[in-house]
Amino acid sequence: MSAAPPPSPASAPPPQPGIGFLAPLVLFTTVGPVAMQMFLPALPAIQKDFGVSAAEAQMTISLALLSFGISMLVYGPVSDRFGRRRPLQIGMFLYCAGCLFCTIASSLDMLIAGRVLAAIGGAGGMTLTRAMVRDTYPPSQVAPALSQLMIGQIVPPMLAPVLGGLIAVSFGWRAIFITQTVVAALALLLVLRLPETLKQRHIGASPLTLLTNYGTLLRHPRFNAFTLFNAIGIGGYFLCLAGAPLVLINTLHLSPAEYGLIFILVPGSFMLGNILTSRLARRFSPRVMVPLGSAFSIAGPLIGLTLVLTLPLSPWIVMIPAGLMTFGHGLSMSSAQAASMAARPALAGAAAGLGGFLQMAVGALVTQGFGLIHDGTAVPLLAAMAVASGTAFAVYVGCLALDRGRTEPPE
């Protein structure tokens, strides 16, 4: 009797949870954010080389962000139909091609096209890795695993602007995209060896079905509770990204280097919260972790607002409260992410994509809106951060109230 042929990579059993599984996912999920932030220090050089205005150069950011957010809507439900492996492979290929296109760009239009292509590809890593964790880990381990994934996501984007600046000064701005292309090629090689994690493919992927799936999720109070909590709450972080440089550099006259060092407190606090969550989430449900994290996220900006109204303005009066807010994000958001995907397990990929898109949409909205209320002081920044955190928790409580007594439809 002949031996059975070995299973193909696509049909191999899902990998066992562990660092060997999570480490490649960290790479896949960080390539998009790193590409988004690594080239920011080179924007003035790009503007000068192509002879364009600052507004035109900014299109390399805005159009990439828009493409990133929209693509997240597509990857999730497509992966529910076709599996995680193939869409992620396509995404990493597009990311690699986009980075290479940026390297050889001879005009701003070519650079924008490359940035958009890389953003479309990078969105696959951000979206599908979350769903792959949901596929692979038992329910009690999803939140801790997502927390560990988030820890790995924090450090590379945090260091990306520093690294990008050093590369641009030493070798020119194109060297940034050469570096990204090399990393993209490594990610592509790894993803080609990735086994499929989705055990059962659930839903068709026609445009009408995709819209129906999103409508199903948006009518689910528990999905809305955890997804909107994350989307609105992360608005506080985007507000900090937009407002802290205006306050610390323009008002307090810190140098960009000093600002960069102090700002590390904000993502560092988020990382600390996620480290604690990776342990606490094994014992406490998302309905415990979300209020716990919200207590810090709301209290931080309120404390800062009180201090800035009563004491002379200093960098620490702004950044320590911001760090408390992001520490709360670290405590709550990975648990909320796990709970949002568990609301409708058959639509876990669509849930991850929709959640990511909503976060990007809120981030774009609040960063644009902050420019309308900024008055040169720290008051609007801290007040807006407090409003974002408080609104996120209020929406969470309201949606859970609607979920009481709800009967789940069959999957």
Image (cartoon, rainbow, N blue to C red):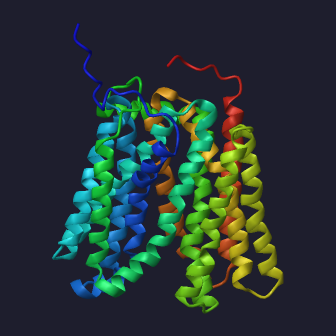
Q: Is residue 129 left or right of residue 47?
A: right
Q: Which one is nearer the viewer's eye here, 200 or 241? A: 200
Locate residue 321, reporting x and y percent.
73, 70
Above or below for 293 versus 339: below
Question: Relative to 303, is 267 on the left or the right?
Answer: left
Left or right relative to 217: residue 143: right
The image shows residue 263 at horizontal and vertical percentages of: 60, 76
Q: Nearer the viewer, residue 19 or 219?
A: 19
What quarter of the picture does the N terminus occupy?
Answer: top left
Residue 109 sits above or below residue 139 on the image: below
Determine the residue positioned at 76% across, 73% down. 304
Q: What percent of the width, then of the height, locates residue 174?
A: 26, 77
Up-down: is 69 above or below 46? above
**In the image shown, does 308 or 280 lie closer to the viewer?**
280
Q: Residue at x 69, y 68 (%)?
A: 323
Locate residue 33, reporting x and y percent. 43, 61
Q: Residue furthest front?
A: 1
Q: Quadrant of residue 223?
A: top right
Residue projecting furthest to the top: 1
Which residue lies at the image location 55% right of the left edge and 18% below the top edge? 409
The reply to whether residue 51 is visible in this rendering is no
The reply to whether residue 345 is visible in this rendering is: yes
State how many labels appear. Answer: 0
